[in-house]
Each structure stands twice: as structure tokens, then as C-alpha cells.
Image: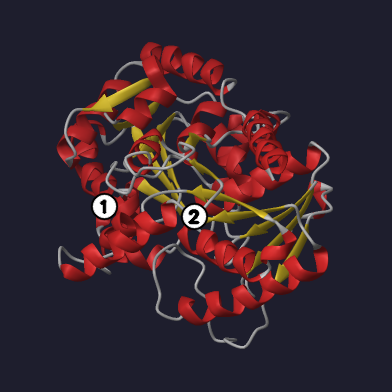
Amino acid sequence: MKVLVVAPTPFFSDRGTHIRILEEALALEKRGIEVTIATYHIGQDFPASLNSHIDVRRIRRLLFWYKKLEAGPDWQKIFLDLMLIRKTFHLARTWKPDIIHGHLHEGVLIGFIVKRALFWRNMRLVADFHGSLTKEMVSHSYLRATPMQRFFEMIEHWIDGLGERTVASSWDNVERINTIPREHPAHILLDGTRLSMFENLPSVTVLRDTFHIPKDQIIITYTGALIANKGITLLLEAIPLICAQSSEEVHFVIAGFPVDQIAVYLKQDIFKKHVTIISPLPYFALPKVLRMSDIGVDPKESSTRQASGKMLQYMGAGLPVVCFDTKNNRKYLDDGGIYADDTTPESLAQAIMKLVISRELREAKGVINRRRAELFSWEASAEKLEKLYQEIIREN
């Protein structure tokens, strides 16, 4: 089986969307499926340590000045996506895949256009949604509650129905998509964690020395994009509240990019003293950062209908996790989470303090999460994808 993955993004970058694309592709390759990825002109190549033969094909560098790696809309992506249509069309015509697997709404639309243009090839389209297009644009302040937002909602609903099969990374998003009449309901395709990444790591002491982290304090860690719709502002505003109660006990690690988005906070003395910034955070260095940590925090709200890949990484590392009380978070963590009651810095700080004051609670929640991490693997997601591929090929 040959699968052409459409990734309308600067693949690979060290953030959740790209991790999902990468790990799905690697797991499919292990199942004997040939995978080619069509993507933008910028992004990292695969490290040799992956021992992968996935072919990453990039558009031409006509927009050579475009170097944005972080998440979020950008009007220049219109031109990049037009070029990606051309690249996808070329690969579909010459490589002749059985399946076009479109990631994100733009990737699904590109796959649909190419499939229709080459209709005699009978290629099938799988739509892979990571969140809500409109909600994400609103969260990045690209849209407001206007007729323009309603227009984009109409486009999003139309794209939601383009695939022969549809998968989404969160339960909330699956429920939303399934409100649209369709022949085949959307399936949940969870993010996963690769537990082997957390094996054979250096000791906590060695790692804290390496990253210049205090050895005798409780390390509270956030990893991921440093942008508003990931909830980072809520965590930053909770930090002074926590330090006011236990400033000598805690230290925070914030690992990700772009740092300029939180620069106004980092100028304050309390952040200079109690926060270590690791930026950028390479995905393949993530296990080391989590290994030296005591608590993982995911302050993302549910409004974008995105899943939480970082939460699964925390679980794989055996960390207790603090987050907000959402359906997706409950599904992942169950009894392994400490849930903030309200979406406020005060509530988040109170939840974190429950773990700060109790080592026993930290250890108990960490054990639960490490065990639950075994339920969420990329291998299981790839097996489910392969079955969907086989179904639509048999129908064809």
C-alpha cells in the first residue's frame, strides 16, 4: 500500500502537530506501508537515528523569506498551499498512491482537489483533523465573532465532509464533526507516546546539571508552543501565586518556542529567579527534560478542540499532570490528573500546589499515568489507520 501524506506546514518542527504527522508516518512504515510526505519548503529533515525511508518532498523555495515555524495562521500560507497543490498533484500523478492522507483542513482540501483532478486514478482520501480550523483562527485573534467567522465555519463544515474516512485527535472534535450528516462517522484517532524514548536515560542529577536546574527543588515543567491558545499565559500568571506560597521549594522549566511571545513576563525578577527557559526544545531531547521533572502542566483550554500530545509525553515519563477539567483530559488521565476547577491562574496555582506539598501524591499520580500511557501508542493508531485504508480500498 502506498500513502501520500499532505502536510501543509513547515514539517518537521518541534511541536504537537508535527509530532502527530511524524509518529503516524513512522508507525505506518513499520507496518509495511510506503509513505511519502508532501510539505513546505522549510523544516527539519529526519535524524538518521530514526532509520526511516519515508520520502519527504518539499515545495520550491519561491517564498525564500518565509521562515515561520510556530503555529498560527499567516496570509502567505495561501501561496504556500497553492504550491503544495502543485507538488501533491505531481506526486499523485507520478508515484500513484492508493491513499491520500490529508492533515489539517488545508491538507484535506488539497487532497480533495488533487483526487478530483486525477479522478480516473480512484485514489481515496482520509481526512485527519487536529482541531477546529475556525476555533484556532479565533484563538490566534485572526477572526472575531463576525460574519467572516460564520463564513469560515461554513467552509470548515464543508471540508469536514470531504474524506472517504475521517479521523480526529480529540473526542470533542469527533463529536462536533459527527453533527454533520455523513455516510461514515468520524473516528477517534488518538495521539500516542513512544515509551522507548524514556528508556536508558541519564540520572536526574546528571540531567539537572546539564540543563543548570536546581537539584533540590520541585521542578514544574511545561513543554510546547509558547503561544496564547496553548494556555501558556495562564501558567505564567499562576507562577507568582505559587512562588508566594513556596518560593524556596519550586522551580519552573518552560521549554518550547517562540520565546518572544512571553518576553514581557521573563523581564520580571520573579521569573528570572524561578524559571529556566529551554528554547528551542528538540522533540528528541524531550524525554531528558521530562526525566528531570517532578510535575507536568498542560494549561490548554478545550476551545480549540485540540488533543494534548504533551500530556501523553508527561504520562510516558511517569509524571503527575495538572490540567483543566475537560472531557479530553479526563479521557487521557482518569485518576492520574490533578484538575483545576476553573480556567483561571488562581485555580491552576491551587491545583499545582496540591502536588507541591505532597510527595506521596506526586508519586501515586505518576505511577497511574505511566501505566495509562501504555494504553496510548502510535502503533495502535497506525493499526486503526491501516484498517480504514483497507476498508475504502475494498469499497473502491
Closer to us: 85 or 24: 85
**Residue in front for this viewpoint, 320 or 36:** 36
The answer to whether residue 7 is seen in the rendering is: yes
- Measured from the top left, where is residue 141 in percent x and y? 25, 66
Q: Which mark is residue 233?
A: 1
Whether residue 266 is visible, yes or no, is: no
Label 2 – label 1 distance at C-alpha = 36 Å
Left or right, 15 with reference to 47: left
- Neighbour tally class for label 2: few under 14, some 14-19, many 20 plus, Cα within 10 Å: some
Instruction: Kindly report which numbered mark, 2 or 1, lies closer to the viewer in this rendering.
Output: 2
**Drawn side of residue 45 relative to residue 128, left or right:** right
10 Å neighbourhood of mark 1: few (<14), some, or many (≥20)? some
**Residue 310: x, y in percent?**
48, 40
Name above or below for residue 332 compared with residue 130: above
Amino acid type at mark 1: Thr
The residue identified by callout 2 is 162
Q: Could you tell me which residue is drawn at 32 percent across and 50 percent down?
A: 232
